[in-house]
Amino acid sequence: MVMRSPDDWLAILETVPDPEIPVLNVVEMGIVRGVDCTEGGLTVRITPTYMGCPAMDAIADDIRTTLGPFAREESRSLTVELVYSPAWTTDWLDDKAQAKLEAYGIAPPGKTSDKRALNGEAPDIRCPKCKSTETELVSLFGSTACKAHYTCGSCGEPFDHFKCI
Amino acid sequence: MDARFDYLLRLGDDALILGQQLGLWTGHGPALEEDIALTNIGLDQIGQARAWLTLAGRIEGQGRDEDRLAYFRDQAEFRNALLCERPNGHFGDTIVRQFLFDTYAVGLHEGLSRSSDPEIAAIARKSAKESAYHLRHSRAWMVRLGDGTEESHAKVQQSLDDLLPYVGDLFHSDEATQNAAVEGWGVDPAELREGWEARFNEMLDESGLTCPESVPEQTGGRVGRHTEQLSFLLAEMQVLPRTYPDAQW
Ligand SMILES: [Zn+2]
């Protein structure tokens, strides 16, 4: 039997959706930091988006459930390891992932090189529905830790903005 | 005993006690957005507490994990600053408590990001992003309430007068914190005071709130001398795991 490479394992991990934003998988979200194959072992390193992210346990469970059968095929013991460094950043969401978010109705984070968001100045947040930038911050905290709540002045749509960190 | 253990308890207990209190706002916020904001901040605090306490337990090497440290220590073993155990009070009280803490936390996390201990540095870098965001929220409310109506100004000024005496405990410095700074893995909180005051005074300028001429200082949290408020809080937080120590969920 040909043993899977780390890239093969990553490809399987791309079938695991983020439980709170199912339009993205855990690799696209940047939660999966890497896969290490050792003699008889397989370790998946994951990092939290926010320290208190309540979805981390569910994500670890989903990873174990999805990879488990494949790991057993290769007689590997599976470990999901939580790491804090380097700290998660929305910069790990590439252009494709950002476009998926917008199509799903969540205004994407943009890039942290645009420091306006963190410094308290209002960045241009585009309404995911009508694309207007006439939008207004309603609350810094939205439906999950990683989102802020906005409303669109043009079409009236209330929407989540993925916070840029 | 490894000196890092007690130091990490101070970090973890601040976050744990504050997070537990913010959680009590669930369903009681003055508006839905604020309900969500306060509980989200609480969630971040609990997340930080878990990371610090897990690391503390591992360094101690006695087999105590985050839950063991959170649920099975008594009041005198807690190392949180007194400010964190001040009661929620009304919304203005909670916001002032949070602002006073956030202005301290941003400096603390920034300093600890340069810790020579890679695990402490990693947790601090992650926490720094969160504390900066929390400060943005609590500071905006300080300005909005201070520079708001006569009633909001009077109320939040009273909250500030009530809570300022507990700020000094955050900057408690002793041999342990001084050694931590010398050895390079920790920050001596005394060194954070200047940065704190600069951020605090900026807020005063913008909100029209004032600082009393002289503020008495209440200290003791870092050595386990707490107010009765912490007893009530711990009783509620610890009753379930202490009644059913083997409970699984
Ligand atoms: Zn719109």
Image: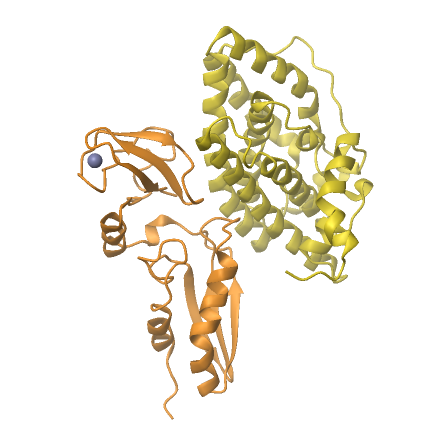
- Name the residue located 62 percent from the left edge and 31 percent from the top edge: B191
Tell me if I can see residue A44 in this picture: yes
Which residue is the extreme one toward the bottom?
A1
The N terminus of chain B: image quadrant? bottom right
Residue A138 in the image, given as x and y percentages of width and height: 36, 30
Which residue is at the front of the view, B72 or B6? Answer: B72
User: In the image, is residue A131 above or below residue A84?
Assistant: above
Residue A108 in the image, given as x and y percentages of width and height: 28, 45
Which residue is at the front of the view, A88 or A105? Answer: A105
User: In the image, is residue B186 above or below residue A67?
Assistant: above
Residue A109 in the image, given as x and y percentages of width and height: 31, 44
Using residue B54 as the reference point, say whether residue A55 is left or right of it. left
Which residue is at the front of the view, B107 or A127? Answer: A127
The colour one sees for chain B in the rendered image is yellow
The colour one sees for chain A in the rendered image is orange
- Name the residue located 45 percent from the left edge and 32 percent from the top edge: B32
Tell me if I can see residue B132 in this picture: no
The C terminus of chain B: image quadrant? bottom right
